Image (tube, rainbow, N blue to C red):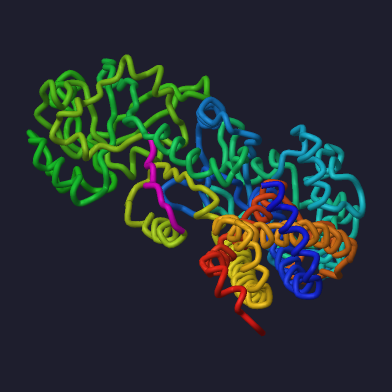
């Protein structure tokens, strides 16, 4: 083998001009391939770790009540954070996301902008701190100024909007927005800083401390908005984590365990909701028999029916108004669920003796705002068995939307929420591949470009190697005949040409790799003016961002060498098959 390598190396340097031309073409191809791959990896890193994280998180948890776009709230913040923290070992950061579309009024000028709440008190890792400072360049003031308590609702404004609104640090601006109760709200904010952001999408966003925004929106301390979940290795784990959370968030039954006081008597009762769908209403009608009242009245939005046992004990009649008193999870004071009895049903062990069945719209109005401790109360409540014919008609503690895999499915799911006809909390868990797909499509385009570059490079190698070897074989036919005549085997002749091509490919790959790193270094120095340009999101500090991978570079080099040698194998095999007599008689 040593002899074959020496012969291949000698032949390689004998035909310098032809090999330099072919090697240069291969080196240029390798250079372009590494640059394209490194740029694609850099953009991918920017997308996943700098844009998607701030726009939607790698995984997002969202909730709203009754399908209302303004009522974005989950009533048990502690519970959902516990579920996420305990079941997502890949977790890097869990951020409560609050935002509201607002009409901002400056000095004689107004504009529509988003107010975003962020937790400035939360400690950041050095890496996240660097990313944060990179994305939010504070021009005036300090970012921590939004924690100030000596001014009214401190806020940080983008420089571009500050100029448009004719405001500066220390000025007061007014904002009009809709709170979670659907009420028009106005508030005053004090500008404590301005920031510069090259990302055009972030130039209409104002930042406040999230606790202040929660207070203005009417969200209590025990409640939360949506969550943005940042995880390790999002490309690998985003869908896995989303599916896992979706399985864990399967809801349990909704109920209120309390008591009714009437006619100087007190009875413990369980209130259960029935859904506001046609299928659910049919199940309720078929499963319950009324001794008093009409089922049509029970199935109306303010409808409720009590068991005959409960009605007898408390002397309840149709159209009586009763109040179910219960203990909320986050309050020391009792809460009330007022109902007007529209029917009295014949009870048994399946329906429950001390039960009240309440329409979805009426039940969740009080259940959501005074959420009980379902885990604690489950021991005293009556929960119908899964085998009960009407069990599917009963409501759960929340409605969990089905998982989606594509953006189109996600869009259809969101638009169909209104068809659920419920006032229950609606929960959805999504990965970035659904919520931030438009951003991530850019990665697909870049990968496609890289793939095309690979195909072009392979084509160059194939044509170049085949043509070069054909010319080489024609010129060295008599040489082939000579070495065959002195005893060299066919396989050794074949190996000489294959090794010669492999050595050329290896040297070209090394040269191309060095050249690629030099070019990337030079391109990274160039600063681009990105003001008002959406393509600024592809840059880091106004510079092109390349992220070469050692594994990718080595893989490309090995792949080029392998392709070259495989391509060389076929003409080399044909040369090896020539008889020594024919080769020696060849004249050109």
The segment highlighted magenta reads 397-406
| Magenta stretch: includes residue 156 | no
Is the C terminus in the top left, top right, bottom left or bottom right quadrant? bottom right
Q: Is residue 189 above or below residue 165?
A: above
Task: Give the residue drawn at x 62%, y 38%.
Answer: 232
Q: Quadrant of residue 477?
A: bottom right
Q: Nearer the viewer, residue 496 or 322?
A: 496
- The percent coordinates of residue 259 (x first, y second) are 32, 20
Q: Is residue 84 above or below residue 489?
A: above
Q: Which is the main secondary structure of the residues drawn in magenta?
A: loop
Q: Nearer the viewer, residue 7 or 535?
A: 7
Q: Is residue 61 left or right of residue 311?
A: right
- The percent coordinates of residue 583 (x first, y second) are 59, 73
Task: Give the residue drawn at x 32%, y 56%.
Answer: 419
The total of numbered circles placed on residues is 0
- The percent coordinates of residue 86 (x first, y second) are 53, 25
Task: Give the residue drawn at x 67%, y 69%.
Answer: 479
Q: Nearer the viewer, residue 34 or 323?
A: 34
Q: Quadrant of residue 40?
A: bottom right
- The percent coordinates of residue 221 (x first, y second) are 61, 32
Q: Is residue 129 left or right of residue 116?
A: right
Q: Is residue 447 visible?
A: yes
Q: Quadrant of residue 506?
A: bottom right
| Magenta stretch: includes residue 400 | yes
Q: Is residue 578 left or right of residue 344?
A: right
Q: Is residue 519 left or right of residue 354?
A: right
Q: Is residue 153 above or below residue 389?
A: below
Q: Is residue 101 visible?
A: no
């Amino acid at each position: 083998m040593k002899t074959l390598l020496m012969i291949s190396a000698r032949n390689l340097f004998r035909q310098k001009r032809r090999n330099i031309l072919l090697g240069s073409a291969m080196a240029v191809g390798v250079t372009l391939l590494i640059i394209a791959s490194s740029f694609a990896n850099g953009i991918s890193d920017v997308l996943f770790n700098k844009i998607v994280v701030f726009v939607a998180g790698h995984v997002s948890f969202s909730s709203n009540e009754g399908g209302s776009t303004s009522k974005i709230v989950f009533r048990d913040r502690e519970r959902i954070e516990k579920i996420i923290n305990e079941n997502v070992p890949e977790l890097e950061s869990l951020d409560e996301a609050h935002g509201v579309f607002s009409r901002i009024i400056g000095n004689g000028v107004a504009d529509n902008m988003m107010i975003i709440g962020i937790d400035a008190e939360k400690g950041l890792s050095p890496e996240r701190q660097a990313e944060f400072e990179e994305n939010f360049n504070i021009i005036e003031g300090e970012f921590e100024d939004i924690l100030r308590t000596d001014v009214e609702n401190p806020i940080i404004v983008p420089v571009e909007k500050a100029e448009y609104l004719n405001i500066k640090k220390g000025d007061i601006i007014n904002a009009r927005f809709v709170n979670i109760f659907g009420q028009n709200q106005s508030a005053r904010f004090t500008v404590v800083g301005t920031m510069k952001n090259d990302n055009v999408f972030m130039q209409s966003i104002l930042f406040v401390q999230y606790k202040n925004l929660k207070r203005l929106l009417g969200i209590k301390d025990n409640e939360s908005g949506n969550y943005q979940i940042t995880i390790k290795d999002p490309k690998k784990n985003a869908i896995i984590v989303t599916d896992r959370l979706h399985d864990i968030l399967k809801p349990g039954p909704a109920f209120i365990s309390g008591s009714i006081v009437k006619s100087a008597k007190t009875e413990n009762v369980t209130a259960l909701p029935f859904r506001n769908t046609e299928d659910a209403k049919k199940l309720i009608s078929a499963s319950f028999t009324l001794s008093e009242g009409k089922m049509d009245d029970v199935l109306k939005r303010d409808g409720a029916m009590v068991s005959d046992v409960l009605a007898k004990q408390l002397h309840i009649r149709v159209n009586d108004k009763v109040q179910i008193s219960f203990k909320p999870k986050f309050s020391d004071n009792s809460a009330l669920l007022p109902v007007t009895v529209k029917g009295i049903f014949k009870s048994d062990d399946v329906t429950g003796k001390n039960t009240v069945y309440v329409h979805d719209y009426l039940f969740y109005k009080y259940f959501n705002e005074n959420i009980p401790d379902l885990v604690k109360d489950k021991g005293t409540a009556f929960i119908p068995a899964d085998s009960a014919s009407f069990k599917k008609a009963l409501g759960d503690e929340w409605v969990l939307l089905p998982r989606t895999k594509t953006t189109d499915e996600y869009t259809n799911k969101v638009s169909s929420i209104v068809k659920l006809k419920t006032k229950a909390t609606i929960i959805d868990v999504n990965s970035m591949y659904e919520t931030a797909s438009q951003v991530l499509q850019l990665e697909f385009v870049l990968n496609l470009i890289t793939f095309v570059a690979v195909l072009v490079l392979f084509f160059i190698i194939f044509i170049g190697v085949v043509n070069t070897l054909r010319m080489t074989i024609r010129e060295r036919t008599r040489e082939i005949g000579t070495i065959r005549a002195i005893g060299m085997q066919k396989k050794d002749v074949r190996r000489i040409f294959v090794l010669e091509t492999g050595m050329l490919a290896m040297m070209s790959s090394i040269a191309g790799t060095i050249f690629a790193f030099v070019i990337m270094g030079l391109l990274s120095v160039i600063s681009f003016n990105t003001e008002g340009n959406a393509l600024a999101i592809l840059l880091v500090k106004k510079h092109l961002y390349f992220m070469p991978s050692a594994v990718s570079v080595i893989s490309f080099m090995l792949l080029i060498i392998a392709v070259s040698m495989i391509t060389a194998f076929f003409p080399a095999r044909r040369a090896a098959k020539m008889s020594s007599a024919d080769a020696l008689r060849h004249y050109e």
